[in-house]
Image (tube, rainbow, N blue to C red):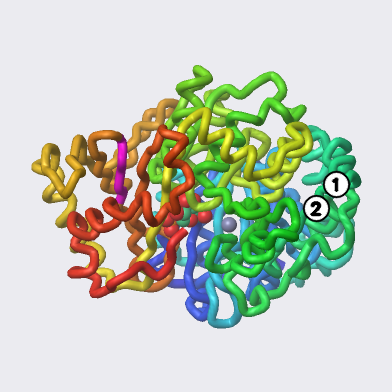
C-alpha cells in the first residue's frame, strides 16, 4: 500500500558542489531524507516506469536511506530500481550502470571523502541519465521543490533483502539487486590491456592499493588481486566499514600518510595508490615520488593513447579552474582542445556528451574520462598501470621526463577548515572589491597581470555560472586562486590554490614549498588570510 505522508519543508536542502551533504544527525531528523528524495522525484524528468539506479558508499546511515529510497521510488511510479548488493555501489560504478541500464537517473548516497559514522557526514546526490551529477538547473529545481513540499509518497511494504542477488517486486516496481563489481570490471576490460598489466605484475612489478576501509575494497580485490593476479595483501584496508575504521577516507598526503611512507622506502613497492569513500578520487604514488593530481591529469592526457580504449587519441582535455595549468601545456603542444570549468565534476558532463573532451581532471584527486560521467579512482589506477606496463619505466622516470618535455608546474592547495563563515565571506568580498584595481600591483618580485572572479559559460548549453573563485595571475604565469568550499558541512572552508611554472629542467628538483614560498607569502598579504581568519597556517596542504 502506498501512503502519502504530510510533511513540512526544510529550508536548507540546497545541493552543493556534489549533492546535499549534512552531518548524520541532521539527516536523521524526521522526514529530512524523505523530503529531499521526494523533491528529487518531483523535480526530475523521467518517463513512466523509469529505471532508477541506487547505491552508496556503505557509510553509516546508508542502509536506512537505501530502504527509504526504494520504498519511495515504488510509490512514485518508477518501473525498476537497480541496486548494488548490500546497497553498495562506487560512484563511478553507479554512473556506468545508469548509462548501461538506460536509467533516467540515479541516487548516490555518499559524502565522498568526508568522515562517516554516527557523528560523521552523509550525503544524497542525484545523477541524470547521462550518468553524471545533476547540472545546476536540475539541482536548483530540486531545491525549489524542497522549499514548497507538503507531502511525500512511500510504500508501506518493506524493501527486499539487499544481500540476495536477483529480482523481486515492491508494489508494481521491480527491485534488481546486482553484483556491484561485475559491470564495472567489464567496462575496464574494454579500456585497458589488463593482460599486459597482469604480465607486468607477474614479471615482478609490485603495487599496493589502500582502499581506506571504503567502497573500493571489493572493486580493488576483484580487479587487482583477482583479474590482475597481484598477490593477496596488495589491497590494504579492503573491507568497507560504516565509519571507515574511524579514518578520513580522503586519499591525500595527510590521510594516506602510511601508504606514502611505505612508498618512500628504498625497498618499497614500485607503485602505490588509494581511493576515497565513494571511489571516485585517486592518489598515485611511485617509489620515492607522490604524483600531484594536476600532474597526473597532464601525464594521463599525454599517455592515454597507450591504453587500447584511447589508442585513437583523445579529443580534448578539461580541467577545473583551480587545477594547475600542467594539462594546458600538454594540450598546447599536442594541438588538443582545452577547457577550463568551475569546480565540480558536473561541469564536465556537457563537454563529454558533446565529444569535445575525452580526459577530465581536478586538482582534488579526481581524474576520469568519457567512459562514465564521474571521476573514477580505480580507472585512474588502471590507466597508470597500463602506461607503466607499456613504457616499462618507473613512476619517477615518467614524471621527470614529463616535466622535461612540458615544464614543471609547482602546485599546492592550502585549506583553512571550519573557519567562521562570516570571516570567510568577508575575505572573499574584500578580494572581489579590490579586483578592479589589482592589475599592475607589485608584491615583492610578483606583479599582478590579471585578476578576476571566474565565471563560466558552458559552450554546449550556454548556461552561465558566476562567482566561481577569485583568480590572481602574475606576470610569468604564476597564479593564486581563492574560493570557498561547496562541500563542507560545518563553518566555511577556504581553499587557496597556488602554482608556479618552471620551464628550466635544472630547477625541477626543488621542493614545492620552496618554489612556492614567495607566492604563499603573497597570497596571505593579498587575501588577508591570517588577519581575517585568525589562522597562522592552513589545516591541510595537498
Ligand atoms: C571538492 C573539490 C572539488 C570536487 C568536490 C567533490 O569541492 O574541491 O574539486 O569536485 O569536492 O568531490 P569543494 O569542497 O572545493 O567545493
Ligand atoms: Zn568522492
User: How far from the left and from the top, in percent, is residue 9?
Assistant: 41, 68
The residue carrying pointer 1 sits among few (fewer than 14), some (14 to 19) or many (20 or more) residues within 10 Å by Cα, namely some
| Residue 234 vs residue 421, the one in the foreground | 234
Ligand 2 within 8 Å, label 1 CB: no
Residue at the location (49% across, 75% down)?
23
Residue at the location (50% across, 72% down)?
32
The quadrant in which residue 313 appears is top right
Q: Left of 532 or right of it: where is 512?
A: right
User: How far from the left and from the top, in percent, is residue 254?
Assistant: 53, 67
Which residue is disc 1 drawn over? 201
* Residues at marks 1 and 2 touching, judged by CB atoms closer than 8 Å: yes
The residue carrying pointer 2 sits among few (fewer than 14), some (14 to 19) or many (20 or more) residues within 10 Å by Cα, namely some
Q: Left of 368 or right of it: where is 310?
A: right
Q: Earlier in the sequence, mark 1 or mark 2?
A: 1
| Residue 468 vs residue 521, the one in the foreground | 521
Residue 193: tell me if it is visible.
yes
User: How far from the left and from the top, in percent, is residue 142?
Assistant: 46, 53
Residue at the location (18% across, 58% down)?
525
> Where 241 sits versus 184, above or below?
below
Residue 16: tell me if it is visible.
no
Q: Which residues are magenta?
A: 477-481
**Where, quadrant-wise, is the N terminus in this rendering?**
bottom right
Residue 2 on the magenta span: no
User: Which SS class for mark 1?
Assistant: helix
* Label number found at residue 206: 2
Amino acid at each position: 500500500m502506498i501512503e502519502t505522508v504530510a510533511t513540512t519543508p526544510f529550508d536548507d536542502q540546497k545541493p552543493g558542489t556534489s549533492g546535499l551533504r549534512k552531518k548524520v544527525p541532521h539527516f536523521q531528523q524526521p522526514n529530512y531524507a524523505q523530503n529531499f528524495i521526494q523533491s528529487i522525484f518531483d523535480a526530475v524528468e523521467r518517463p513512466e516506469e523509469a529505471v532508477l539506479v541506487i547505491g552508496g558508499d556503505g557509510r553509516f546511515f546508508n542502509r536506512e536511506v537505501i530502504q527509504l529510497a526504494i520504498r519511495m521510488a515504488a510509490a512514485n511510479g518508477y518501473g525498476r530500481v537497480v541496486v548494488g548488493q548490500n546497497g553498495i555501489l562506487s560512484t563511478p560504478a553507479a554512473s556506468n550502470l545508469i548509462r548501461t541500464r538506460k536509467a533516467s537517473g540515479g541516487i548516490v548516497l555518499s559524502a565522498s571523502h568526508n568522515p562517516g559514522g554516527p557523528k560523521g557526514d552523509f550525503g544524497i546526490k542525484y545523477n541524470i541519465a547521462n550518468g553524471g551529477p545533476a547540472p545546476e538547473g536540475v539541482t536548483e529545481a530540486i531545491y525549489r521543490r524542497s522549499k514548497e513540499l507538503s507531502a511525500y509518497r512511500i510504500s508501506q511494504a518493506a524493501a527486499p533483502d539487499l544481500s540476495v542477488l536477483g529480482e523481486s517486486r515492491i508494489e508494481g516496481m521491480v527491485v534488481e539487486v546486482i553484483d556491484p563489481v561485475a559491470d564495472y570490471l567489464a567496462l575496464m576490460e574494454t579500456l585497458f590491456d589488463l593482460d599486459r598489466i597482469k604480465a607486468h605484475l607477474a614479471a615482478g612489478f609490485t603495487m599496493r592499493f589502500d582502499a581506506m576501509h571504503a567502497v573500493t575494497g571489493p572493486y580493488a580485490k576483484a580487479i587487482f588481486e583477482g583479474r590482475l593476479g597481484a598477490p593477496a595483501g596488495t589491497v590494504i584496508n579492503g573491507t568497507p566499514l560504516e565509519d571507515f575504521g574511524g579514518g578520513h577516507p580522503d586519499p591525500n598526503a595527510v590521510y594516506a600518510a602510511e601508504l606514502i611512507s611505505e612508498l618512500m622506502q628504498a625497498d618499497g613497492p614500485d607503485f602505490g595508490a588509494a581511493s576515497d569513500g565513494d571511489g571516485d578520487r585517486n592518489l598515485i604514488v611511485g617509489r620515492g615520488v607522490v604524483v600531484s593530481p594536476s600532474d597526473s591529469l597532464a601525464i594521463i592526457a599525454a599517455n592515454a593513447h597507450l591504453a587500447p580504449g584511447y589508442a585513437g587519441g583523445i579529443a580534448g582535455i578539461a580541467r577545473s579552474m583551480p587545477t594547475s595549468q600542467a594539462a594546458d601545456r600538454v594540450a598546447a603542444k599536442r594541438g588538443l582542445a582545452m577547457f577550463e570549468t568551475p569546480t565540480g565534476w558536473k561541469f564536465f558532463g556537457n563537454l563529454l556528451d558533446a565529444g569535445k573532451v575525452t580526459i577530465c581532471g581536478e586538482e582534488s584527486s579526481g581524474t576520469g574520462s568519457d567512459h562514465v560521467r564521474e571521476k573514477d579512482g580505480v580507472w585512474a589506477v588502471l590507466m597508470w598501470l597500463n602506461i607503466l606496463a607499456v613504457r616499462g619505466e618507473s613512476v619517477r622516470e615518467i614524471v621527470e621526463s614529463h616535466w622535461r618535455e612540458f615544464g614543471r608546474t609547482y602546485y599546492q592547495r592550502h585549506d583553512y577548515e571550519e573557519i567562521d563563515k562570516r570571516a570567510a565571506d568577508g575575505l572573499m568580498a574584500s578580494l572581489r572589491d579590490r579586483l578592479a584595481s589589482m592589475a599592475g600591483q607589485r608584491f615583492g618580485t610578483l606583479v599582478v597581470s590579471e585578476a578576476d572572479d571566474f565565471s563560466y559559460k558552458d559552450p554546449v548549453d550556454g548556461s552561465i555560472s558566476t562567482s566561481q573563485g577569485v583568480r590572481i595571475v602574475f606576470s610569468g604565469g604564476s597564479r593564486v586562486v581563492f574560493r570557498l568550499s561547496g562541500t563542507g558541512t560545518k563553518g566555511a572552508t577556504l581553499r587557496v590554490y597556488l602554482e608556479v611554472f618552471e620551464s628550466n629542467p635544472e630547477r625541477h628538483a626543488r621542493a614545492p614549498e620552496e618554489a612556492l614560498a614567495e607566492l604563499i607569502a603573497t597570497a596571505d598579504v593579498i587575501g588577508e588570510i591570517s588577519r581575517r581568519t585568525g589562522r597562522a597556517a592552513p589545516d591541510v596542504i595537498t
